[in-house]
Image (cartoon, helix red, strand yellow):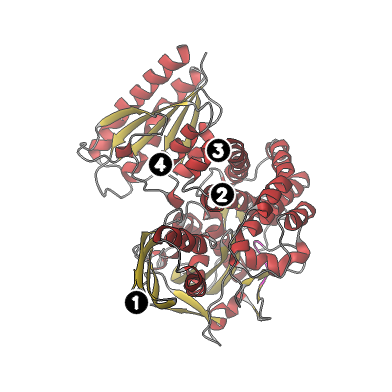
Amino acid sequence: MTHRRVEVPVIARVEGEGALHITARDHEIVDLRLEIYEPPRFFEAFLRGRAYHEVPDIVPRICGICPVAYQMSAIHGFEELFDVRVPEGVRELRRLLYCGEWIESHVLHVFLLAAPDFLGYHSAIEMAKDHPDLVRTAIAIKRVGNDVMELIGGREIHPVSPRVGGFSRAPRRRELEALLPRLEQALERMPGIADLVGSLERPSLPRRAELVAMVHPEEYPMNEGTMASTEGRRWTFAEYETVTRELHVEHSNALHSVIAETGTPYHTGPLARLNLNADHLTPVARECLRRAGLSLPDLDPFSSMAARVVETALAIEEAIRLIRAYEPPDPPMAEVVPRAGRATWATEAPRGTLYHRYDVAEDGTILEAKIVPPTSQNLRHMEEDLRTFVPGVLDRSDEELTRLCEMVVRNYDPCISCATHFLRLDLRRL
Amino acid sequence: MRRVRVVGVGSALGDDAAGVLAVRAARAELERLGVDVREVGAGAHLLDLLEGPDVVIVVDAVWVQGMEPGEIVRVEAGPHGLPAELRTSLSSHGVGVSEAVALASAMPDPPRVILLGVALAEGRGGVRPSARVLGSVPELAARVLAEAAALSRG
């Protein structure tokens, strides 16, 4: 009988700090825990007592990679509660800002965090020596995403212009049009990138899973829609906390999420969005789907990198469309009059659905806040995936096993800082 | 004339703001010299700024064992990036200044990368930088300017 214990004390190329402990006997897992030891950050507590209009400046500090998502979930929630009608053009400008964040975040993950795994390198730095053109392409595409964010948001991280009611300043048409040539070049490169991703040998993990994302009748969802799952569930933002439930687990400073009715895990993210919204893919995104070798439905988490490539193409196409049709909102912001009540909203952050709820006093003071980031919703599913995946690869060396486990985790592009907020592997073969 | 870019790295809060504050103090003079001046909040955003110019001066708050808060350090990246003692990443998604510089150094024809850093006080948070770090900002700004002026002439 072989006993084995594997510890990955720090999971690399993920955001935040976590560890993986696996104890195995022969080909069976005795114990498997994804330990999230990154300390809690108490954002929900220090939002209490703040004014609603301060929230768009506080919540983006939760994440340097997806600050727009944090702003958008909060802003939309308050606007619905206060019955704010935003000026024409604000909706389009917000979608364009979100496109910038998707481009930047997805490219960082696909090329610098995930690609080295699939190409057999320990890091992007090693990969860059053999594939400089690939890295240059990635950096150029990421840059244009950053520039979209900087131009609209006032700076490239933690944007300052998005407000409840609209924007403090809307960019001029010619400022945005100056980005078009680089966006068009980036789009031209996407089918070739999809070919490359399609040619990579990747592990597979066929398993049953419930994938959750927003859906929208007319577009690929970012800021607006309702909730749906691949098991046929449908719910509104107001029902989020009754359909899903957060659980505290002893080994994690991040809460886990389950479907309340069944107690089973679910996961959000690009693969979920793609499975639930394939009808709304833009033309080049659809071509990338085919060329990356994806055929839907596809529930295999190792298809996530290809899903990110498809969504990058979509975000670039959407950005081009929105800029061509852009008319600056005038005024850029509507008047906002707060009222008491509960604000609930979700938007699609690059790594999955981000839900916010605020209980608000009559004068707009925050009485209670709840933020459910995509990574904490995905954590239980990461553990489930590892439980399914690891028994099949226990014959591998500790080094190879660690790499494979990290790949399983990285499929989710976790942001542990957001979730508490990953990975050390501690494997014990008993 | 060499193409020189100066990049201030850091958030606007606490000791981490030192690099950005120094670059802001020197910005007008730097721009007069034709230097491209940028600010980034995180190392991941530095990646795309290391392409294009001949020299990139990165200005950041650093933490190095044994250095006094406010002390200024100058290092130049080699073929493997920055020296190991500066490779402690405190950054998002494991892509910090040192990773970004190492990635750029691994590519063909990398730019010359000079890091001008100011040592921060350990565990120093808060809104305002500490007095010792703030006190070093004028000198850091002067060093950035002197370095950029010499490089753009050269």
Closer to the camera, A281 or A331? Answer: A281
Camera-side mark, 3 or 1: 3
Q: Is residue B41 visible?
A: no
Query: Mark 4 sits on what residue?
Result: B10
Query: Mark 2 sits on what residue?
Result: A119
Asked whether the residues under marks 3 and 2 belong to the same chain, the reply is: yes
Q: Which tag, 1 or 2, sits closer to the chain's start? A: 2
The percent coordinates of residue B112 (x first, y second) are: 45, 25
Q: Tell me whether the residue at label 3 lies in contact with that at label 2, contact meaning CB atoms closer than 8 angstroms.
A: no
Q: Tell me whether the residue at label 3 lies in contact with that at label 1, contact meaning CB atoms closer than 8 angstroms.
A: no
Q: Is residue A193 visible?
A: yes
Q: Secondary structure at mark 4?
A: loop
* Gap between marks 3 and 1 measured at Cα: 43 Å
Residue A250 badge: 1
Q: Chain of mark 2?
A: A
Q: Amino acid at mark 3?
A: Asp
Q: Amino acid at mark 1?
A: Glu
Q: Is residue A406 above or below residue B132?
A: below
Q: Residues within 10 Å of mark 1 (few under 14, many from 20)?
A: few
Report the residue at 51% width, 60% height from top: A407
